[in-house]
Amino acid sequence: MANLPHPVQYQGSKRNLASHILRFLPSKIDRLVEPFAGTAAISIAVAARQSAKKFWLNDLNKPLIELLNLIIENPDDIADAYADIWNEQLTDSVGHYFEVRKKFNKTNDPKLFLYLLARCVKGSVRYNAGGLFNQSPDKRRKGTQPATMKKNLEGVSHLLREKCQFTCLDYRQVLAEVKSCDFVYMDPPYQGVCGNRDSRYFSGIDFDDFVLALKRLNEKRIAFAISYDGKLGNKTFGKILPESLNLKRIEIEVGRSSQSTLLGREEITVESLYLSPSLMRGQFVEAASYISKAPKQLTILEKHG
């Protein structure tokens, strides 16, 4: 999965976990719904596996969804725009970045957004309290080369073109519209990182509201999976989802964090994946088989708290 095309190194993306997550997803999906799509890492992986016919990509970040739409449906246009912006930076790359950022904050132009994502520190989207993009440039590099970017954009488009619906809605609106034949994958911001506000999404999600939305999915017998909480060493991020939802919680060992490596620590990052009752009824045998083959990487937890 690591060789799949991706437009940017987006912080928080499940690109590096996709191969593990896909082990627990149905092998045949009518429509994959991502209410918190980000850069659509899971949809890209599912499309490469040819497991789904259609995709619904939603994100509260409107320029991000507009950018995904351009990448998937008009890759040549966005690749040309990126090359033009990238080539303008050569004389004063840092000053150029701040000019592009200023222009983006006035226009929300997704073509400018691609350059900012490719050039900013750690591919990390950050907004201030006023909703303005405020991440700084990575001064050690100038962003993905245009030729490489074009190849990645064309690769993503090849996998998903004419298969997607794009929306910028509150996740609850999306979940209210999903159907029994859909499969939902969710990677929401969680409170352990963002408190009541996530700088990627302008505002966080309320935990109780989220739990209620999941309860309603269960009542509709919708199959879903959620990447939600996690831990770094002994430090836990995010509130564990309640046992009353009857979700199966899998812990996936991601590996040693880059920050821990820099500090000379042995802290391991672990992320949780929750599987819905409707999913488990069809997939548990496959999931259990996978866990038994990789006991050091995955742990299945029967209890939540």
Image: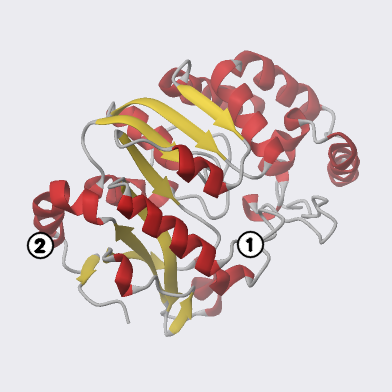
Q: In the image, what residue occupies the spot 28% across and 26% down?
A: 50
Numbered label attached to residue 292? 2
Tell me the residue that label 1 is attached to.
204
Q: How far across and down, in percent of the image, does residue 159 sit?
A: 41, 22
Tell me whether the residue at label 1 lies in contact with that at label 2, contact meaning CB atoms closer than 8 angstroms: no
Q: In the image, what residue occupies the spot 47% across and 68% down?
A: 257
Q: How is the image coloured?
A: secondary structure
Q: How far across and down, in percent of the image, does residue 218 sit?
A: 31, 54
Q: Is residue 246 above or below residue 89?
A: below
Binning the other alpha carbons within 10 Å of mark 2 as few (below 14), some (14 to 19) or many (20 upward) gives: few
Marks 1 and 2: which is nearer the front? 1
Q: How far across and down, in percent of the image, does residue 11 sit?
A: 57, 53
In the image: residue 188, left or right of residue 127:
left
Binning the other alpha carbons within 10 Å of mark 1 as few (below 14), some (14 to 19) or many (20 upward) gives: some
Total marks shown come to 2
- Residue 194 visible in rendering: yes
Q: Circle 2 sits in a helix, a strand or a loop, which is it?
A: helix
Residue type at mark 1?
Answer: Gly
In the image: residue 198, left or right of residue 29:
right
In the image: residue 136, left or right of residue 1:
right
Residue type at mark 2?
Answer: Ser
Q: Nearer the viewer, residue 177 or 287?
A: 177
Q: Nearer the viewer, residue 42 or 80?
A: 42
In whole angstroms, how far apart are the C-alphas of marks 1 and 2?
36 Å
Residue 240: quadrant of the picture: bottom left
Numbered label attached to residue 172? none
Q: Is residue 180 above or below residue 243?
A: above
